[in-house]
Amino acid sequence: MTIRLEHIWKSFGPVAVLKDVHLELPEREFITLVGPSGCGKTTLLRILAGLESATRGEIWHGDTRVSDLAPGKRDIAMVFQNYALYPHMNVHGNIAYGLKVRGTPKAEIAARVLEVARVLEIESLLGRKPRQLSGGQRQRVALGRAMVRKPWLFLMDEPLSNLDAKLRVTMRGELKRFHMRLETTTVYVTHDQLEAMTMSDKIAVMDHGVVQQYATPAEVYNRPANTFVAGFIGSPPMNFVERAELRGGELALDCGPDGRIAIGASPLPNGFAGETLLGVRPQDLEVRGAPRAGAVPATVTLIQLVGSEKLVEVAFGAAGKLTAQVKADAPVAAGERVWIGFDPAKLHLFEPGSGGNLALR
Amino acid sequence: MSALGAVRQVIAYLVLLVVTFLICFPLIWAASTSLKSPKDVMATPPTLLPAEVTIENYRNLVTGKQQYYRADQSYVPTTAAPQHFTSWFANSVIVSLGSTAISILISTLAAYSVTRFRYRGRRIIPYFSLLGYMIPSIILVFPLFLVMAELRLTNSLWSLTFGYVSITLPFCMWLLWAFFRGIPIELEEAAMIDGASRLRVFVDIVLPSAAPGIIAAAIFSLIVSWNDFLFARVFINSIENLPLTVGVMHFFEGTHVDWGLMMASAVLMTVPMAILFMLMQRHLVAGFGAGAVKG
């Protein structure tokens, strides 16, 4: 059954942290709420859990209005950022607690805890206290506690952010595998766009309490709704060039002393003309040693090697800056004169004032 | 270890030894005296160890006999009364445990309330409560006596129980408030999502997490009420209802002090608390430590 968040508003005193959030969460999907800190994503998750009540709006699960129910009556499970394992109970006690509270028969509790422990490979840890576990193990116990009740919804609040970088990548894969295995609808909160991109079926990008875009990872990446989404999703972040002018079906950049350079045909299907904000991802730029038509002359200011790639920062025109991502062995050096080529199919044009994507108008 | 280091260590241990002796000497003296016969007690020069060990004093304490002396009956009436060591001891136990139980029950609930519920004044209550604890009991005792008199509770163990609660409750609440604030709220939220009611969360999650704090508060409360002299002296006027602290004063009589009985009861008064301390020492240190840092 689909979960519907209907026009959710939330204010803390005079501060509105959620403004008219309206989302449909399809059954069995992995949905990520992503955004910078303070965007309201955790508050939204807590409202779903019943730990906060919405100032206005309702939550529906099929025909059931969930927003009236206490957290314990919603039959959902949540994994907290700091895991929130009960410190005085051992692993078995932690996983079993939800079942015990619900009055499940002892034999069934034992069987289900064991089953979950087997799936998570923590059978040998059942007798230990949380403080005797490593970060990754605690993570699994928290997951086990959520899984054992077979809830209809998993809520996860930045569950990987307390782990070191390497373990985070491993657990990311595991979480995804568990989701594929259990097929329980999952709402996952993170500020890490990479986690959002890699794990999700759908992403809700949030900023200032508003859902900026709600779509598949590919859609969010390839057709960002506005400059916020475009800048937030993708690493390294998208370049923005101001005062890119569309005229007569051509897109031209103001390159200061080098004059106006037409970099290609307009990517917009509609006949928009005028000044726009150009967005282009570092991966979509070409760095050339020799001029060609439509390439912008620039000077390399900084090179950062990141393994198999390097990030080339260039300055062009009066005050323009771009970052391009090229192969590590590309022959570029700081201080060199280069020409930056654009692929018209991979340009994003935004309205200068609102920041909205002109292609989606 | 270098020679200098060794010398330093020796000096440090010597100092500690002297300090330990100074602290322990009265206790040793009391224990030794309690095991002496009347003749040895008053021996000149005094001996540290009894010439012959006797448990006569303890036997007399428990059987309620006053062995040597009957004071002039008309002189100071209380001194004429027979001693009631067993009732005094029982009174002390009842009053200490009773006031501690009430203090802990109220202070855990109150401290939890001010940490977790949102209402007007919840931030200020703990500070007021500490302020209450700062008022010396000598100032509290007379107003409290009037209250007890109004409630017709004077000369009963209830007056002491409630009197001690009024001193210990504010500090216990302050201590537990610091403790509850240190418990991550996510633990409670996790339990609520697991389906537990607020009360169940409190019993299953909050109380065990705050156990060191509760133990520390309970020990504090026990010590205060066990050792109190002032309230007992003011609130109680019949000899059978006295707690130990004031009761043993009756071994001082007009012309005679029964040192043997006195010291035996001092030992029996100290032992329960000493045992409790030894058992709970670890928790006590953890409790006060946590309170101090977070408070």
Image (spheres, coloured by chain):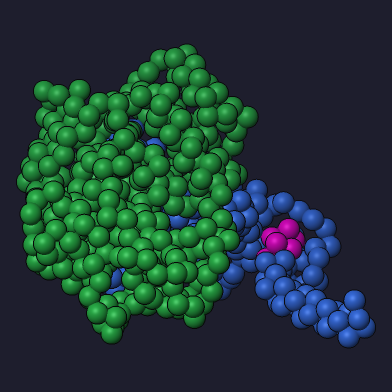
Q: Quadrant of residue A248?
A: bottom left
Figure colour of chain B: blue
Residue B274 location (% of width, % of height): 61, 57
Would residue B31 be counted in the magenta stretch?
yes
Say if residue A138 shows up in the picture. Answer: no
Quarter of the image where the N terminus of chain B is located? bottom right
Q: Which chain is green?
A: A
Would residue A37 be counted in the magenta stretch?
no
- Eyeballing the image, is A311 above or below B274? below
User: Residue drawn 83% across and 58% down?
Assistant: B52
- Eyeballing the image, is A172 above or below B281? above
User: Residue drawn 30% across and 30% down?
Assistant: A29
Quarter of the image where the C terminus of chain B is located? bottom left
User: Residue drawn 63% across and 29% down?
Assistant: A124
Q: Quadrant of residue A209?
A: bottom left
- Which residue is more in the foreground, A294 or A237? A294
Q: Is residue B228 left or right of residue A78?
A: right
Residue A70 location (% of width, % of height): 20, 35
- Eyeballing the image, is A202 above or below A315? above
The magenta-colored residue range is B30-36
Count of marks placed on residues: 0
Prevailing secondary structure class for the magenta stretch in the rendered image:
helix
User: Residue drawn 63% across and 55% down?
Assistant: B278
Residue A96 location (% of width, % of height): 44, 27
Say if residue A284 shows up in the picture. Answer: yes
- Which residue is more in the foreground, A215 or B246? A215
Q: Is residue B192 left or right of residue A164?
A: left
Residue B44 location (% of width, % of height): 79, 77
- Which residue is more in the foreground, B163 or A233? A233
